[in-house]
Image (spheres, rainbow, N blue to C red):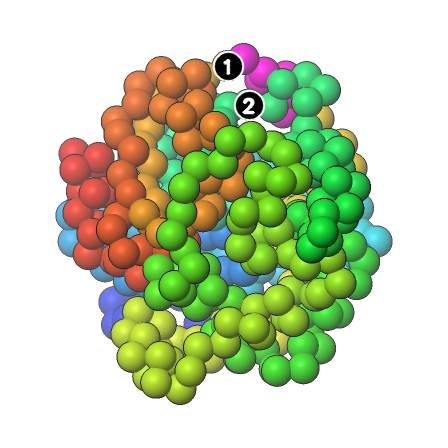
Amino acid sequence: MDPLRYPTLPAGIRSRFVEDINGLTMHLLEAGEAGRPALLLLHGFPELAYSWRKVMLPLAGMGFHVIAPDQRGYGRTTGWDDSYDADLRPFAMLNLIRDQLALLGRLGIEHVHAVIGHDFGSPVAAHCALVRPDVFRRVALMSAPHAGAPRIGDHRSAAVTRVSPALAALPRPRKHYHWHYAQRGANGELMACPQGLHAFFRAYYHHKSGDWAGNDVFPLKGWTAEELAKLPTYYVMDLAETMPETVAHEMPSPAQIAACAWMTEAEMAVYAQEYGRSGFQGGLNWYRTRFTGTNMEMEAFAGRRIDVPATFIGGARDWGIHQGPGALEAMATTATSDWRGTHLVPGAGHWVQQEKPEETVALLRDFLR
């Protein structure tokens, strides 16, 4: 497969493949010179290494070697099973950490100055720092708070499962998006979305951004159906709808699309084209591991805190910071021992490093010193 060569990839960011990465041929984007202190950037769902394009060169300009891989199940990285019936163990959290350790080993990097994760990349980054603080010496989390290592027998998926009947029984019946993404038909619904992938991504990204008028966020009082139903439908969906149907209700107007400087139509096309080729099942399998006990090994770290310097950067208009009640507060207290601050960027929604790259870089500059 060819390296990434879209015109919207800034000049100075390199695309290449590295073979023999824990069974993968991993595609990565790089900026800055090898041999400098390294930063490892881990994307989320439905994203790509490309999602870091706006911050990579400024970070490299600070003297770092910046590395952003397409993670297992995403983009141009190959060697993973794209079927629903795939063995989920390769998608388990501990193996995702192994992927990053193997990549660093192949690159000849003994440790990174920091690992930085966004969305589903945030828990990977957090657990990298938790499990191997000697390798991942700082951690910056974005948009998805880390409430701590899973307690023995206490799974987030179990909480989703427990609340699902109550969500379905609400006057406006609802379902949690984790549960929906774990279903067999989710990938097919996304790939065959009636509006087409480009329009789906446009609506999805708009709906979760600071541009959407409904993203006036506030903390939830607890993990109950009534409280969770206060979340927008991209997190707690209407029971009878697919995700393409959910976000289609919030498709921005042509004028709004034209005014969206942080995600042009040419940039949006990259996501549509890359996911049109790879599908979504790889990323969806990450969600499925939460319902199958695949991540039970992480319970061995129950009660352990992240001891390396840690920080959080999110959008002030991002419901993701509150979708797990109490997680934002736990991250800064019980889940870490060297907390360096919680930073919520005004005007930004879920895609903080794309919506507000300059503010994100400024916060990272202070943290990385």
Residue occupying the point 44% across, 37% down: 219
First reached walking from the N terminus: tag 2 or tag 1: 2
Left or right of 231? Residue 293 is right
Q: On the image, which quarter does residue 187 sit in? A: bottom right
Give, as a single range, the part of the protein colored magenta: 298-303
**Residue 23 spot, x, y in % from top left:** 65, 48
Question: Relative to the observer, which residue lies in front, 102 or 257?
Answer: 257
Instruction: Quote the CA–CA distance across marks 2 and 1.
Output: 7 Å
**Residue 129 spot, x, y in % from top left:** 43, 28
Question: Relative to the observer, which residue lies in front, 338 or 321?
Answer: 321
Question: Relative to the observer, which residue lies in front, 42 or 2?
Answer: 42
Question: Relative to the observer, which residue lies in front, 266 or 246?
Answer: 246
Callout 2 amino acid: Ala
Q: Which quadrant of the rendered structure holds the C terminus? A: top left
Q: Name the residue furthest front.
A: 171
Residue occupying the point 58% across, 17% down: 301
Q: Name the residue furthest bottom.
A: 254
- Magenta-colored segment: predominant secondary structure: helix
Q: Is residue 214 visible?
A: yes
Q: Are marks 2 and 1 in contact (CB under 8 Å)?
A: yes
Q: Secondary structure at mark 2?
A: loop
Residue holding disc 1: 304
**Residue 146 spot, x, y in % from top left:** 47, 31
Q: Which mark is residue 149?
A: 2
